[in-house]
Amino acid sequence: MKNKLGILVLGALVALCLTPSMLLADASTDYSEMADWMKMTASQGSIPDGTVITMSNWQQYKQFMPLGMIKLFEGSYGWKMPADVSIPVGPTHEGGVPKTWTEATEKYGPQTSFEILPNGHYVLKNYHGGTPFPNPQDPQKGWKIMVNAYYAYVPALYVNAPENYASVWAIDKYGDVAPTTLILTYRWTDYITDPNFPTKYDYAPGTWYAEWAMEETPEQARYTASLSMFYTDQEKNPFPDTFVFVPALRRSLRLSASSRCSPVFGFDWTYDDAKTNGFNGTTSIYTGDYLGNRKILTLAKFNTDGAEMPAGYDMPLGWPKPSWGKWEVRNMILNDVHRIASEAPGYCYSHRVMYIDLATWDGDWVDLFDSNAKLWKSIAYLNDIGDVPGLGNNVWDGVASMAWDLQNTHMTIWSGFGNEAKRKPFLNNNAPKEWFNGVKYATPSGLMQIMR
């Protein structure tokens, strides 16, 4: 029975590695609509504080909405805004990165550079922390913007432990919900700027970031875990290494490079989507095209009690209810991220249009187009500005995300603080001591400690 289950799990993993675009249905929106959107939003006014956007007046404010949000209001796909949608608008909050990050940007930014190799790959040079290109300009402005988003600030240690697990709902077109709980830790292993941490660790040499996650429920998936390791030398290692621990086999499997298109734990984020900045690829074989600057609506300051799952979500779309707090208009830069031409064949996305917050360089919204340049998914990455221990207020503090597969009408909701305890993630030095164990939570050997 155990061997049979192992074969089933292996078969599932192979299926996940198939290029998702092979399974897609046709859609009505192609990439040319981005040009129309850019023209429509070229002249933006303002939204008065106290405005409430509803189904009856949303078209007055669509020049402040990402393309995918407009499609949800239009009802162009199976997913559409609930009839009672209510988006209260308030003032814009300042802040987003700590002083130590700004200091690193000022210190190292002037020396950061790049080289384009004969094979078209990019090599980032002399990066040591902070925002790599604080004032990105040509040449290769779009690539520099992408790199800024790739290295966007998050705390040195982020933990959803059993006491404050992450809640995830996978929802199909019939409204059926498959709930999951996860424990996870994301951590910097190099280029660290937060105080009371070393600038780098030696337990995972050659890496700068590690993402570890494990399913707690449902019981049949318990102990399934994933570890992704991101390398400083991205020409030598143009793809992050990803390992999946399979409980039935009592071992981990290293995924192939094509797994970047695979859904993480079967959710609507691929491995290239699974980070709060909206891009989880690399800086070597991806580049970007600068599209322009716009003012975009987003949620940046949460009432986490109001954001609890599921009471804080307007179903079936999973849209944030007014209990979350007020939306705000923030200055953003639009960038179209994609593989370089020589690496593009077979990749699932032709365009990743990122709406990047200029204060934080986080991609707060992403519109994803399939290999045929049809709109496929829209993902909201709602990055809370709150309090990080030792760094003060008005700093990145948590995340919630909604990923809508518009073509196939299913979606996934993530809440990093939507659990029953209503606790925010542990950040930096308020994390329990166990979670500072980098060998266990940031190396392949650590995966083998699961179930012991």
Image (cartoon, rainbow, N blue to C red):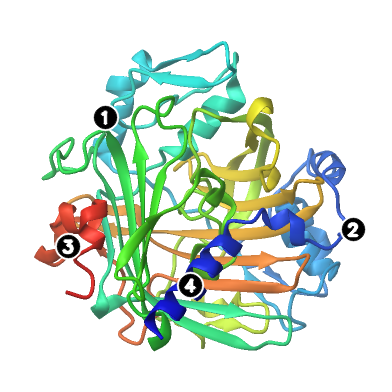
Tell me the mark number nearer the camera, choosing from 1 and 2.
2
Q: Quadrant of the N terminus?
A: bottom left
Kind of residue at badge 1: Glu
Tell me the mark number nearer the camera, choosing from 1 and 4.
4
Res. 57 visible in picture: yes
The x and y percentages for residue 76 are 86, 67
Q: Quadrant of residue 247?
A: bottom left
Q: Which mark is residue 7?
A: 4
The x and y percentages for residue 228 are 37, 51
The residue indicated by pointer 3 is: 435
Give how far apart the Cα atoms at labels 1 and 4 are.
51 Å
Q: Which mark is residue 28?
A: 2
Answer with mark 1 or mark 3, whichever residue precedes in sequence.
1
Q: In terms of depth relative to the viewer, which is nearer, 37 or 266?
A: 266
Q: Which mark is residue 103?
A: 1
Asked if the residues shown at circle 3 and circle 4 are in contact, with their CB atoms under 8 angstroms apart, the answer is no
Mark 3: secondary structure: helix
Q: In terms of depth relative to the viewer, which is nearer, 6 or 38?
A: 6
Mark 2: secondary structure: loop
Give how far apart the Cα atoms at labels 2 and 4 are.
39 Å
Answer with mark 1 or mark 4, whichever residue precedes in sequence.
4
Asked if the residues shown at circle 1 and circle 3 are in contact, with their CB atoms under 8 angstroms apart, the answer is no
Mark 1: secondary structure: helix
Q: Residues within 10 Å of mark 3 (few under 14, many from 20)?
A: some
Residue depicted at 80% across the width and 74% down the height: 78
Tell me the mark number nearer the camera, choosing from 3 and 4.
4
Tell me the mark number nearer the camera, choosing from 2 and 4.
4
The x and y percentages for residue 270 are 56, 56
Q: Residues within 10 Å of mark 1 (few under 14, many from 20)?
A: some
